[in-house]
Image: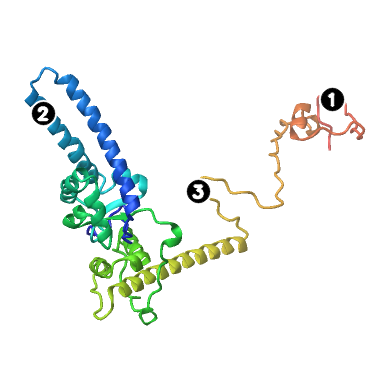
Amino acid sequence: MNELVTGEAVALELRPAKLPSRALAVLLDLLVAFVAYFIVTLGLVIGASGLDEAAQMALSIAAFVLVLVGGPIAVETLTHGRSLGKLACGLRVVRDDGGPIRFRHALVRGAIGVIEILMTFGVVACIASLVSARGRRLGDVFAGTLVVRERVPAGQVGHLPPAPPWLAGRFAGLDLSAVPDSLWLAVRQYLTRMQQLDPQVGWAMAERLTADVAERTGAPAPQGIPPAAYLSAVLQERQARELQRAAANGAAEARRWQGEVGQGVPPSSPAGYPTPPPVGHVPVPPTAQVPAPPAGQPQDAVPARHIDSAGPAAPQDSPRPAERPTTGFVPPA
């Protein structure tokens, strides 16, 4: 998939940031930059005290350019448009098509920002933002970028629109197994936020997503169907298949349990866990093995320890059998 929607879920709704929030973010960024510039300058004064005046002036200019100009450019490039002030205010710099910015965008914004923010104390940037329909300053116009609101309240996010009725079941035979989950997420995000997009930007995004889905399915998108309608119908088909698969798995599991219960077999327990005994089962202790008496010895002459091990002792008040004299021989039968 191309850079239309990244794995970071770049905000596709493109809600332009208002001037107060942008000004607050710029003030926070400038405060951090000037603190860093003061620390660097103090270190240069202490470390370069032995240099001449020209060298000190060159170091001061280099520190100004690196900290106040190069610092914001590097931060916006590495964070894809999220500086410290914009992160605190819930803002982000994106391209006009909604994708993340690169080094060239941050470089143009930073270079022009020196003139319209630092040298004019933000007057030119404020005037340009008030005149622009989407609140862009001159750096955004020349770089092709836009500052948008990244954190949107949950109640303002659109719901997934249903597919057109005339496309119901149109893509039942389409192979969707090769479409990755990241592309499905991008399609879902676009459909839920396409009402807030600029019409031209939204149409371009729908065409690019349609091309990505058609490439993964191996079947071209039908002619005459709007890209947004095609994406909505394909996504609805995928959801229907997921529901059918889940229902089939649940029915198979229910039939398996019913079969086991009908046959009197306890239901299978999860792997690694013992199967519970049936209801009403009373455990029976193992019976001790009583050894047979040796040859020529009567059955009653089994030692008392074997009788005790075979079971509980007889009660005291039970009648005891008559004792026979032990004469050493067995009486005739």
For residue 271, which numbered disc appears in the image? 3
Instruction: Give the image location of residue 299, x and y in percent.
Output: 78, 34
Pointer 3 and pointer 2: residues touching (CB < 8 Å)?
no
Residue corresponding to mark 1 = 326
Residue name at image x 12 percent, y 28 percent = 59
Taking the image as drawn, is residue 317 in sight? Answer: yes
Q: CA distance from mark 3 to mark 2?
A: 75 Å
Lower sequence index among marks 3 and 2: 2
Q: Earlier in the sequence, mark 2 or mark 1?
A: 2
Residue 305 percent location from the top left of the image: 76, 27
Q: Quadrant of residue 154?
A: bottom left
Residue 145 figure quarter = bottom left
Check disc 3 and report its element: helix, strand or loop: loop
Q: Secondary structure at mark 1?
A: loop
**Label 1 environment density (alpha carbons within 10 Å; few <14, some 14–19, many ≥20):** few
| Mark before the other along the chain sequence, 1 or 3 | 3
Image-based side of 276 in relation to 225, left or right: right
Residue 75, percent across and down? Answer: 24, 42
Q: What residue lies at 36% left-to-right and 44% top-to-bottom?
A: 88
**Quadrant hosting residue 58:** top left
Residue tagged by mark 2?
A: 57
